[in-house]
Image (cartoon, rainbow, N blue to C red):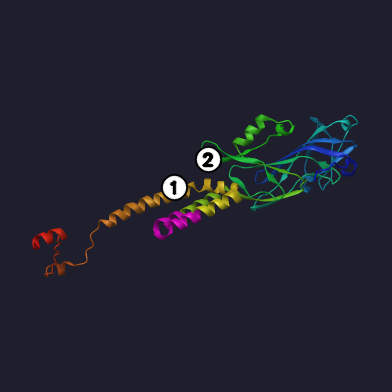
């Protein structure tokens, strides 16, 4: 059901576009928020993470720095002039603070507006080092990236850029981000004040995926019963079901399991060579003392005559 809403009931501040960029380096977090805001208020308030209030917060309106009041709890208030209240303004907010990502589970506070403000479009870009990946999808967010072939492996490609939603975009900044980091893009229909997800190192992903693929390969090599068509068909169906249920983690694990597949193929080649050598070895069951004693020799006479030849001889 789609119907018109009364703007006065939703408040006098409308965030037409919202783009939040979060950098997580392992010991530091930096947020860069870009908002296209239309408001008739004298000031606008945005609630930042509580740790952001302990450091410096840089605010600019239409690329002009402004003074903003930030409380110890992270409540940020910036004023609007009369001219700015009659049109849409571009607000940028940048802050950083220490943030340790020791554990794999990460719970983040995100900047958000009050309940009287209407957020029409909100995107969140998460940037991690090259050796770290996000497993799954943060609660309440929708992924906005696709998997594409980059001449070597499969990789994530964002479906949108800031310029695609009407916000200024710096191409040089995007190029530097894509060459030295992993980036994820998400969208949300409702304003989100927090997000939780899992971060895993690439070494652990490679170890788990390669170990699993090597284990499956060794079972297929040394246990011939596992090579039946039924078991292989069941394994393929299970893999396809997991892929359609969670395509992003499956593609990531398949990419990381290439090392285990290579080891399994090497083990199969060695097993085939050893099996051929054992096939041509003549077993020796008698000792040298038994060789001097005579042994019985049996001979087998094979009659190659057919039934027709036997009838001719009888005739």
Q: Position of residue 44 (x, y in %)?
A: 86, 39
57 left or right of 238 in image: right
Return the mark for residue 262.
1
Residue 106 position, x and y percent, is 68, 51
10 Å crowding of disc 1: few (<14), some (14-19), many (20+): some
Dot 1: what SS?
A: helix
Report the magenta residues as a range: 216-235
The chief SS type of the magenta part is helix
Residue lying farthest front? Answer: 315
Labelled pair 2, 1 in contact (Cβ < 8 Å): no
Question: Residue 13 lies in magenta, yes or no?
Answer: no
Secondary structure at numbered mark 2: loop
Residue 315 position, x and y percent, is 8, 61
Q: Which residue is painted at 54% across and 49% down in the image? A: 253
Q: Quadrant of residue 163?
A: top right
> Going 59% across and 47% down the picture, which residue do you hit?
247
| Separation (CA) of disc 2 from disc 1 | 15 Å
Mark yes or no: residue 304 visible: no
Which residue shows up at 44% across the image and 54% down it? 217
Q: How many marks?
A: 2
The foreground one among 30 and 107 is 107
Q: Is residue 288 above or below residue 150?
A: below
Is residue 230 in the magenta section?
yes
Q: Nearer the viewer, residue 14 or 241?
A: 241
Identify residue for label 2. Answer: 153
- Please give the label number shown on residue 273: none
Q: Residues within 10 Å of mark 2 (few under 14, many from 20)?
A: few
Q: Position of residue 24 (x, y in %)?
A: 67, 44
Image quarter of residue 84: top right
Q: Quadrant of residue 175?
A: top right
Residue 259 is at least partly visible in this image = yes
């Amino acid at each position: 059901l789609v119907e018109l809403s009364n703007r006065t009931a939703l408040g006098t501040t409308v965030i037409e576009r919202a783009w939040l960029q979060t950098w997580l380096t392992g010991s530091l977090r930096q947020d860069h928020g870009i908002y296209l805001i239309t408001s008739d208020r004298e000031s606008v308030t945005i609630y930042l993470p509580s740790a952001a209030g302990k450091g410096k917060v840089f605010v600019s309106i239409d690329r002009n720095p402004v003074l903003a009041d930030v409380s110890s709890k992270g409540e940020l208030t910036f004023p609007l002039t009369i001219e700015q209240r009659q049109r849409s303004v571009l607000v940028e907010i940048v802050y950083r603070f220490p943030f340790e990502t020791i554990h794999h589970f990460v719970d983040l506070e995100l900047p958000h507006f009050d309940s009287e403000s209407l957020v029409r479009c909100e995107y969140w870009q998460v940037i991690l080092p090259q050796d770290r990946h996000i497993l799954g999808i943060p609660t309440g967010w929708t992924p906005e990236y696709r998997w594409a072939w980059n001449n070597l492996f499969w990789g994530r490609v964002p479906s949108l850029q800031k310029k695609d939603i009407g916000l200024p975009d710096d191409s040089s900044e995007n190029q530097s981000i894509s060459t030295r980091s992993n980036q994820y893009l998400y969208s949300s229909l409702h304003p989100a004040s927090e997000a939780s997800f899992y971060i895993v190192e690439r070494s652990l992903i490679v170890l788990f995926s390669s170990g699993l693929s090597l284990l499956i390969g060794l079972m297929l090599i040394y246990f011939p019963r596992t090579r039946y068509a039924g078991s292989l068909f069941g394994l393929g169906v299970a893999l396809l079901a997991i892929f359609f249920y969670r395509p992003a983690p499956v593609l990531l694990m398949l990419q990381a399991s290439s090392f285990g597949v290579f080891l399994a193929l090497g083990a199969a080649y060695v097993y085939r060579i050893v099996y051929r050598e054992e096939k041509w070895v003549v077993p020796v069951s008698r000792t040298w003392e038994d060789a001097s004693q005579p042994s019985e020799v049996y001979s087998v006479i094979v009659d190659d005559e057919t039934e027709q030849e036997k009838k001719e001889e009888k005739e």
